[in-house]
Image (cartoon, rainbow, N blue to C red):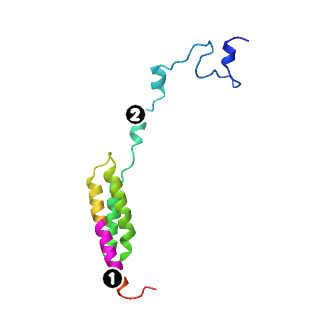
């Protein structure tokens, strides 16, 4: 057996650290750049914006909480999404701040409706 055949495993592919001639394998810059994704693919993988969704949840939560106390979960969801939107570096924080404020208003109105319902008598 030759020295080059000792580096070939059962699959027939040379080992990663040496070439069949026994010379150490060093990847070149051309090989590394060859596997880089195109710039269009990198731009498409940007995370989706949460700020508009947070604001939409907050607005719906405020509208619902003006009439019934069931806007509470929407207010909580808008509040959490607003915090996420504010903390993301890729988004502007204006939508997130509006979502947080309106969500807090929604939670306060919903809590008022729930307290009013509890004070009216037994619920069950």
In the rendered structure, does residue 114 fall within the stretch colored magenta?
A: yes
Q: Are marks 2 and 1 in contact (CB under 8 Å)?
A: no
Q: Is residue 44 left or right of residue 66?
A: right
Question: Where does residue 14 sit, x and y in percent of width and height?
Answer: 64, 20
In the image, farthest residue toward the bottom: 121
Residue indicated by mark 1: 116
Above or below — where is 72 with respect to 6? below
Residue 39's disc number: 2
Question: Where does residue 90 sit, x and y in percent of width and height?
Answer: 32, 45
Mark 2 or mark 1: which comes first in sequence? 2
Give SS at disc 1.
helix
Prevailing secondary structure of the magenta residues: helix
Q: Look at discs 2 and 1 and give the one toward the viewer.
A: 1
For the residue carrying disc 2, how many other residues have a C-alpha within 10 Å: few (<14), some (14-19), or many (20+)?
few
- The quarter holding residue 110 reads bottom left
Span highlighted in magenta in the image: 104-116
- The quarter holding residue 83 reads bottom left
**Which residue is depicted at the point 66% across and 18% down?**
7
**Which residue is depicted at the point 39% across and 46% down?**
47
For the residue carrying disc 1, how many other residues have a C-alpha within 10 Å: few (<14), some (14-19), or many (20+)?
few
**Which residue is depicted at the point 39% across and 49% down?**
48
**Which residue is depicted at the point 31% across and 48% down?**
91
Above or below — where is 68 with respect to 38? below
Above or below — where is 34 with respect to 56? above
- The quarter holding residue 117 reads bottom left
The N terminus - image quarter = top right
Q: Is residue 13 left or right of residue 25?
A: right
Above or below — where is 109 with respect to 45? below
Question: Where does residue 42 sit, x and y in percent of width and height?
Answer: 41, 37
Marks 2 and 1, how far apart at CA: 57 Å
Give SS at disc 2.
helix
């Amino acid at each position: 057996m030759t020295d080059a055949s000792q580096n070939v495993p059962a699959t027939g592919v040379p080992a990663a650290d040496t070439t069949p001639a026994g010379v150490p394998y060093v990847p070149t810059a051309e090989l590394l750049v060859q596997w880089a994704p195109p710039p269009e693919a990198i731009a498409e993988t940007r995370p989706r914006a949460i700020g508009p969704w947070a604001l939409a949840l907050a607005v719906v939560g405020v509208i619902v909480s003006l009439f019934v106390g069931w806007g509470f979960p929407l207010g909580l969801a808008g509040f959490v999404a607003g915090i996420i939107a504010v903390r993301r570096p890729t988004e502007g924080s204006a939508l997130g701040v509006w979502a947080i404020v309106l969500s807090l208003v929604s939670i306060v109105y919903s809590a008022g409706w729930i307290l009013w319902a509890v004070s009216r008598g037994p619920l069950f």
